[in-house]
Amino acid sequence: MIDQETVKNIRTGAKVKVYERIKEGDKERIGAFEGVVIAKKHGSEKGGTFTVRGRLGEYGLEKTYPVHSPLISKVDIIGTPKKVSRSKIYYVRDLSPKRIREKIGQSI
């Protein structure tokens, strides 16, 4: 689970690295997913989530994580945005990584 200080610092436009527990058969490993937070819903409530958009090869990939999920071992905040004028930045789905860097100061 994520501590409350980290939950407050996860903001739209921030570049994060999420470490999640992945169970494969009887083995368990930790996998990392890095990307930009494009949405945060319901804050730190019981049903709160945040959506991270990253790149896997040449494809864009989005994952939605519950804030209080026991499968998340930790979240590292790599960078914070210069300025984001919206709470949901779904428009980055249509932008290239270069344009995202110009808009919010982070790259996917």
Image (cartoon, grey):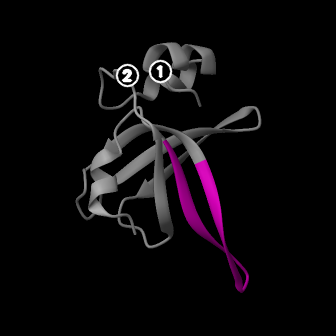
Judge the density around disc 2: few (<14), some (14-19), many (≥20) Cα neighbours within 10 Å. few
Residue 84 against residue 60 in the figure, above or below: above
Q: Are marks 1 and 2 in contact (CB under 8 Å)?
A: yes
In reply to whether residue 90 is colored magenta, the answer given is no
Identified by mark 2, the residue type is Lys
Magenta segment, principal secondary structure?
strand
Q: Residue at x 50, y 24 (%)?
A: 92
Q: Residue at x 53, y 54 (%)?
A: 18
Q: Which mark is residue 105?
A: 1
Query: Residue 82 in the image: x percent, y percent?
Result: 37, 22
Residue 50 against residue 55 in the figure, above or below: below
Identified by mark 1, the residue type is Gly
Q: Residue at x 33, y 64 (%)?
A: 3
Q: CA distance from mark 1 to mark 2?
A: 6 Å
* Viewer-side residue, 83 vs 90: 83
Left/right placement of residue 46 relative to residue 100 reads: left
Q: Which mark is residue 17?
A: none
Pick the quarter of the image with the N terminus. Answer: bottom left
Q: Sequence-wise, which precedes: disc 1 or disc 2?
A: 2
Pick the quarter of the image with the C terminus. Answer: top right
Residue 69 against residue 94 in the figure, above or below: below
Res. 68 image quadrant: bottom left
Q: Residue furthest bottom?
A: 26
- Secondary structure of the residue carrying numbered label 2: loop
Res. 32 image quadrant: bottom right
**Magenta part of the protein: which range?**
16-33
Q: Which mark is residue 82?
A: 2
- Secondary structure of the residue carrying numbered label 1: loop
